[in-house]
Image (spheres, rainbow, N blue to C red):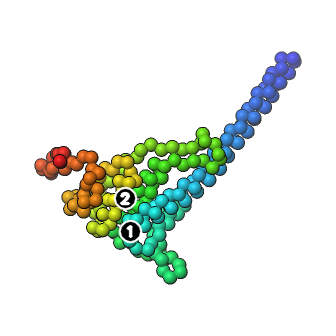
Amino acid sequence: MQKVYSGSITASEKNKQIMLYNKYAEAIYYWVKDTYEVKEIEIKDQLEKKVNDIFSRMYHGKRQVVIDSKYRVSLLTAYGDSSVQTDESRGLETVKNFAFIAGLVDLARGKINSNTGDEDLALSSEPYPLVMDAPFSNADEKHVSTISKILPEIAEQVIMVVMAKDWGYAETVMGGKVGKKYMLVKESETLTYIKEVG
């Protein structure tokens, strides 16, 4: 009988310990969840602000970028005292997308500090290269120039695959910041060489 009694006490003590650990785990879960929700709102607001700042430097009209809770990006046009969502041309969509990508890269490069005052929670970022394929295809000459000026300021490294006709406009602005240039030389339908230029 003493053996059963001792076993029950041991099991009861173990259960108390497990219940305590469960409470710790639950407290940590809610702390992480609450911190994540607060940081997500802060980061989205910071991103929207950065994207609007970059967009206003790339675009010459009066439009504003709006990012919803699912990170869908749209443009509002000032119309009297209010703003309305309007259709976008392919060129305007390109500028909007550039501003969004540049905003993401710029935000990732920065240091995002926690609201809790605990410096151990500070998030740091590493350098992020920006890689783009045919980035200027739908942008006009003026927007290619403004985009070419802003991108090297935001990303530490930009890697682009650009058509020669588009590079002509971009080169006048960012040509001096280019480290290496390569050209794709098409030999046949199945064979293309990469050749360093300059």
Q: Position of residue 17 (x, y in %)?
A: 76, 30
Which residue occupies 37% across, 48% down? 156
Residue carrying label 2: 150
Q: Is residue 116 left or right of residue 131?
A: right
Q: Is the residue 49 above or below the residue 184 in the image?
A: below
> Horizontally, is 69 left or right of 174 in the view?
right
The quadrant where residue 93 appears: bottom left
Residue 75 visible at all: yes
Could you say whether the residue bearing mark 2 is in a helix, strand or loop? Answer: helix
Q: Is 11 rendered above or below residue 144?
A: above
The amino acid type, in three-letter code, at marker 1 is Tyr
Could you tell me residue 98's position as x and y percent? 38, 60
Crowd tier of the residue under label 2, counting other residues whose Cα lies within 10 Å: few below 14, some 14–19, many 20 or above: some
Q: Residue at x 65, y 50 (%)?
A: 34
Q: Residues within 10 Å of mark 1 (few under 14, many from 20)?
A: some
SS assignment at label 1: loop
Q: Quadrant of residue 148?
A: bottom left
Taking the image as shown, residue 40 lies to the left or right of residue 193, namely: right
Q: In percent of the image, x 47 and y 72: which residue is there? A: 76
Q: As rendered, which of 149 and 20 lies closer to the eye?
A: 149
* Figure quadrant of the N terminus: top right
CA–CA distance in space, label 1 to label 2: 12 Å
The disc labelled 2 sits on which kind of residue? Ile
Q: Which mark is residue 19?
A: none
Question: Contact (CB < 8 A) between labels 1 and 2?
Answer: no
* Residue with the mark numbered 1: 59
Query: Eyeballing the image, is 8 above or below 154?
Result: above
Q: Residue furthest right?
A: 1
In the rendered image, residue 171, in percent from the top left (x then y), is placed at: 24, 58
Q: Quadrant of residue 86?
A: bottom left
Tell me if I can see residue 33 in this picture. Answer: no
